[in-house]
Image: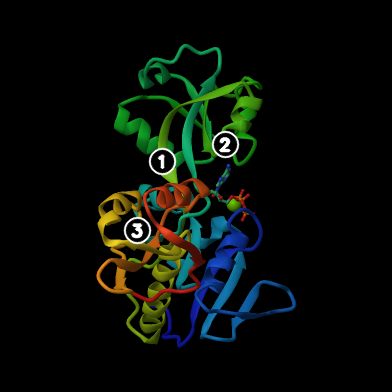
Amino acid sequence: AAPARDRLRIAIQKSGRLAEPARALLSSCGMSWRESRDRLFCYGETLPVDLLLVRDDDIPGLIADGVCDLGIVGRNVLLEQDGDRRGNGRVPSFREWRALGFGGCRLALAVPESCDWRSPSQLAGRRIATSYPALLSQWLEREGIAAEVVVLLGSVEIAPRLGQADAVCDLVSSGATLTANQLKPVETLLESEAVLAGPVAPFDDVRGELADLLLRRLDGALRIRHSKLLLFQASRNVLPDLLPLLPDAEAPTVMQVDGQDSLALQALCHGALTWQRLEDLKRAGARGLMVLPVEGMLA
Ligand code: ATP
Ligand code: MG
């Protein structure tokens, strides 16, 4: 077992799609760091939580080996390496702790646009290029299809044009890369996003308390990420018209202002408060509408 440590170490991507949002999320949990000269290690100043900046592919292994305690990585990478380890008879040594709501994409199967796609059984005996052999093999097995998996580390989407494969299994977000390569997505194997990954078992030293503190702050930060505080006034009798316009709000706080009739309300809304919605609320009788940003929240 790894020696007991009194600081928490989190691995995040050094550069790439998840690097900035991962750091921003941790910063919003009240952390700041001093960076080492080589920019690989960031020493936590406000909390004993340090960062290690690495290639995303290394993150699950760093957790498995106990070099890092937690990591922020795509679910696709985490599950691929988990599948690979299981395939090699190793026990799982990391798991997803939280979905983080950024880095969204899906692992999709794509075929040439000219292909008349009807069902996965068409893949029998075909070659499929991918950087996710474990996830693809699991899916093929579930579907009961025997196909050849061609492992490529990059440029998977040009494999069909090069005659290397008949289909590809790759990450897709907008689909522009597929279109540019005359491919179309036909099956989704996995919905992915960035996740906080950690060990299977909880920590049994002071890192456990640090991890709990981090999770509480993270949950607060995730909850208010797109939230706004809405303040307005209304007469009591229009409340039944107003509340259905706030389906994404937590039960509003209602205060009586003058006499019987006039109420002041505050509601935490989790969806986008567009001009359209504010106008709808005004039309239904809301007065003095005000939208405020939410800086922090602790449940
Ligand atoms: P590294 O140098 O750290 O190995 P990388 O090139 O493997 O970086 P990125 O391209 O930065 O990785 O992608 C990191 C993660 O971003 C992916 O594993 C995936 O979870 C997520 N992601 C979101 N959208 C996409 C997309 N369109 N293509 C690829 N990855 C995406
Ligand atoms: Mg990588």
Question: Mark 3 vs mark 1: which is more N-terminal?
Answer: 1
Label 2 CB, ligand 1: below 8 Å?
Answer: yes
Q: Which residue is mark 1?
A: 190
Of the residues shown, which amino acid type is indicated by label 2? Ser
Q: Which mark is residue 94?
A: none
Q: Residue furthest right?
A: 37
Q: Is residue 10 left or right of residue 139?
A: right
Amino acid, disc 1: Leu
Q: Is residue 132 left or right of residue 164?
A: left
Q: Residue at x 57, y 74 (%)?
A: 51
Q: Position of residue 70 (x, y in %)?
A: 46, 69
Is residue 137 among the parts visible in the rendering?
yes
Q: Secondary structure at mark 3?
A: loop
**Disc 2 vs disc 3: which is toward the camera?**
3
Residue 174, numbered label: 2
Residue type at mark 3?
Ala
> Total label count?
3
For discs 3 and 1, the disc positioned in front in the rendered view: 3
Q: CA distance from mark 2 to mark 1?
A: 15 Å
Dot 2: within a 10 Å radius of its alpha carbon, few (fewer than 14), some, or many (20 or more) residues?
few
Q: Mark 1 or mark 2, which is nearer the start of the sequence?
A: 2
- Circle 3 packing at 10 Å, graded few (<14), some (14-19), many (20+), is some
> Gap in Å between the C-alphas at discs 2 and 3?
30 Å
Identify the residue position indicated by label 3 in the image. Answer: 249
